[in-house]
Image (tube, rainbow, N blue to C red):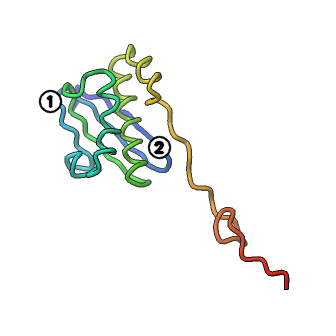
Amino acid sequence: MSDSIQATGRRKRAVARVELAIGQGVITINRKPMDEYFPRPQLQQIVRQPLEAIQGASRFDITVKAEGGGMSGQAGAVRHGIARALVGIDESMKAVMRKHGFLTRDPREKESKKYGRKRARKRFQFSKR
């Protein structure tokens, strides 16, 4: 697809490589239909948010390769990638995407484990006697 535009979306540990092309509005994630990959309606709604913001849900075919993180993180990463791809197609959409917060990456990640501890901050049980 040479007439397509690519963008990368990230949220927490999840990364989504998004490819946008003019089409009938088919969304494919990891070679599966979106409703099969994200069975929860909330996650499907998150993915569709940037398209609903510009009232152009059926104009683009979207192909996504999502990896890392959990389901919610991946859905947020796909949303981020779609928003960035839409801005790449038309710079005038940037204000709308920015207003809805779709271009902001969610930087929260799991804090790394520290040595001598169970987890990042959890201590072993203290016994005075």
Q: Residue furthest left?
A: 24
- Name the one closer to the observer, 41 or 65: 41
Which image quadrant: the C terminus? bottom right
Position of 21 compared to 101: left or right? left
- Image coords of residue 22 (percent x, y): 20, 26
Amino acid, disc 1: Gln
Q: Mark 1 falls on what kind of element? A: loop
Q: Earlier in the sequence, mark 1 or mark 2?
A: 2
Give the residue displayed 44% in from the left and 26% down from the top. 100
- Image coords of residue 33 (percent x, y): 19, 47
- Name the one closer to the observer, 64 or 108: 108
Give the residue displayed 26% in from the left and 46% down from the top. 29
Q: Residue furthest bottom?
A: 129
Q: Mark 2 falls on what kind of element? A: strand
Residue wearing tag 1 = 24
Amino acid, disc 2: Arg
